[in-house]
Image (spheres, grey):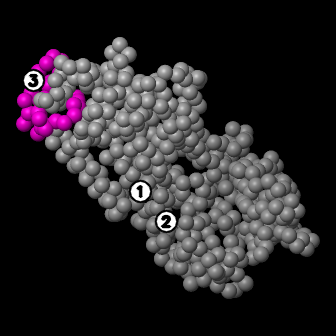
Amino acid sequence: MTPLLAYLAKVIICSGILYAYYHLALRNNRFHQWNRFYLLLCTILSLIVPLLRIPISFTPEGTDTIFVYTSQVVTLREQVFTPAKALPVFHFNWAALLYVIVIVTLVGRLLFGYGKIFLLIHKSHVEFVKPYWFVLSEHITSPFSFFRYIFWNNRVNADTSEGRQMLRHEMVHMQEKHSTDKLFMEIITAVCWINPFFHLIKRELSLIHEFIADKKAVVNGDVADYAQTILQMALQTNRTFSMTNNFSHQPIKRRILMLTQSRKLRFSYLRRLMILPIAIMIFSSLAFVITEENFIAAPLDIQQKKDSTVKPPPAPPKQKIQFKPAQKNGKEVFTFVEQPPSFPGGDQGLNKYLAHTIRYPHMAVERNVGGTVFVSFVVTKEGEVTDVTTVGNPKGHGLEEEAIRVVEKMPNWTPGKQNGQLVNVQFNLPIRFTMQGGEPVKKISNDGAYLMVEEMPTYPGGEVAMMNYLSQHVKYPKEAVAKKLEGTVYVSFDINPDGSVSNAKSVHKPKDGGLEDEAIRVVNGMPKWNPGKEKGEPVRVKFVLPISFKLGQ
């Protein structure tokens, strides 16, 4: 979804909720001024609230910044790009062009209507009767007002009882500045023509203007005579201008009912105060955004080493972590393989390709938006890149679209192998978009563990040995099997200076079904790692290991 469509969708949702509250609790009640300002305010809020982005930081308990262990699910190093290295890409958007054409058409119609009003003023006899201008013409069938102009038919005597009622009615429109409200709503409905609730609000606001003017125009409680005058003028005239305040404004029935309504509404103040929790709900839902920049892929240099001390464990159980190929779009796709695919030229070639191809989105530069975009794709047995998509919380402002565009244009890779055969392999590539001048990443967490060291810890025997350990030790929880629960559990743990594992716990959203408990149990049972080193000295390093649970077919 493009940013424009996302914004319009939020505006429609916000205005729809606010109008629904008006329709159910406030409509056809006699607090007209309250209703008038409520409709104007809900229009403004519907336009502004979706633009607000108030960040709420979310950090998993006990961690600051967590470096994710890059098993083959996330094999590639994080690529960081700043807008200084690239120019924005402009894509022609037909939907946006169509939207603008409709706006221009509606604005043109609005200007044409105002032009007709000023032409009528120019052709009519105009008298200044302080504090307004009196426009007299035989072409005016029903009195109406427009800002400080009152339009009047020559044949209607303003000194009669009916004439004085109509004149008081139009003077109320001028004193209350109802023409300003109408101009505002005409512009809003022209620009946001796709929102049906703004059109409903414009119609209701025009009617509320008439309620206010009718109420103040009645003198000495002579409602019957005033209602008769409204009916007579409604039968004699046709409405000409939608942006003016016409005395014969339809629907006449609601205007007369509002004049004759004498009942006192129960819970009047409660109805008006009910908007507060609704407004808070809308503001919290649309304005606050959760920023989650906790998981950063650590560039690890994992070397496979032979270790004769590692003994093979017992035979694996029937239910276990599946390292067999999964079915995706009718083809077998591996997540783990003996020989992973490689980009032409290796990591250095990949870095060079991304540096020359990625262009920081223009909208993201303007809004100062950055973040890590995780792109998932499949490297086929022919080396082609397919099934490109993004995973995780969207950053918006074109970051996902640009990351997908670059990955889709990649040249063919050297395909991966399993048991000596070329196979399809799934990869996740983290690409971090960073504005220049950003804060440096923290190196030590609050509990004293290192988040990044010069020499990262490694599992004894390398990555393949760790995969074998997981496949033979993880037991799929019975409860998760019964509930058919799947997913990836992220286990945070510390690798101490002596290589032992401690402080294992799950982070991110819980999966339930015993998946977190099983993942923690397996991590706690790991043999000692080769410890990480900082300035040549072993130190405690914090890691996060993704363990994927997937039921067999």
Q: Residue furthest right?
A: 314
User: Between 54 and 274, which is closer to the camera in this rendering?
Assistant: 274
425 over 141 or under it: above or below? below
Which numbered disc covers residue 127? 3
Q: Which of the two labelled residues, at mark 2 and mark 1, occupies the earlier sequence position?
A: 1
Q: Which image quadrant for residue 46?
A: top left
Which residue sits at x=58%, y=76%? Answer: 379
Could you tell me the amino acid type at mark 1?
Answer: Tyr
65 over 480 or under it: above or below? above
Which numbered disc covers residue 269? none
The answer to whether residue 381 is left or right of residue 466 is: left
Q: Secondary structure at mark 3?
A: strand
User: Between 211 and 430, which is closer to the camera in this rendering?
Assistant: 211
Could you tell me the amino acid type at mark 3?
Answer: Glu
Magenta span: 118-147
- Residue 149 pos. (x, y %): 18, 28
C-alpha gap between disc 2 and disc 1: 13 Å
C-alpha gap between disc 2 and disc 3: 67 Å
What residue did someone put label 1 on? Answer: 360
Q: Please tell me whether mark 1 or mark 3 is closer to you in this view.
A: 3
Q: Secondary structure at mark 2?
A: helix
Which numbered disc covers residue 404? 2
Q: Is residue 44 visible?
A: no
Badge 2 density bin: few <14, some 14–19, many ≥20, Cα 10 Å: some
Q: Quadrant of the C terminus?
A: bottom right
Task: Residue 134: say if magenta.
Answer: yes
User: Between 296 and 234, which is closer to the camera in this rendering?
Assistant: 234
The answer to whether residue 187 is left or right of residue 310 is: left
Q: Residue furthest top?
A: 220
- Residue 445 pos. (x, y %): 67, 42
Q: Please tell me whether mark 2 or mark 3 is closer to you in this view.
A: 3
- Contact between marks 2 and 1 (CB within 8 A): the answer is no
